[in-house]
Image (cartoon, grey):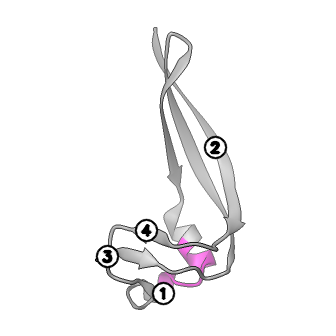
Amino acid sequence: MRMFTSSGLNSQGTHLGPLRLPAGTLPPTGQRMDAPCCDVFELIDGKIKRFDCYPEGSIILTQLGVLGNLGAALVPHA
C-alpha cells in the first residue's frame, strides 16, 4: 500500500558552512536561523520510500541577512 504523510516543523541552526543555491553558493554568515518547513514522506508497505523537506527559503535568507542583496552575497558555481 502506498501513502503520503507530512509534518510541519521548524528548522533551527547556525549557518556555519557553505549553502549551495541554484544561483551560487552562500558562504557561512555565522547567523542563527529558525524557519518553518514541511517534511513529506512517501511510504510503501509501511516503509519510507522517499523523504522531501521543503524549507521556507525567504525566511531563512532574511534571517541570514542576505535577502535584500542576495546576488552580492553569492559566490558563482565553478
| Amino acid type of the residue tagged 2 in the rendering | Gly
Residue 15 relative to residue 70: left or right: right
- Residue 59 is marked as none
Q: Residue at x 68, y 79 (%)?
A: 31
Q: Mark 2 or mark 3, which is nearer the start of the sequence?
A: 2
Residue behind mark 3: 77
Q: In this rendering, is residue 33 above or below 31?
A: above
Q: Which residues are magenta?
A: 61-68
Residue behind mark 4: 20
Q: Mark 2 or mark 4, which is nearer the start of the sequence?
A: 2
- From mark 3 to mark 2, how far is it between C-alphas? 31 Å
Residue behind mark 1: 68
Q: In this rendering, is residue 63 above or below 9?
A: below
Residue 65 percent location from the top left of the image: 59, 84
In this rendered view, identify the residue nearer to me: 58 or 22: 22
Which of label 1 and label 4 is nearer to you?
A: 4
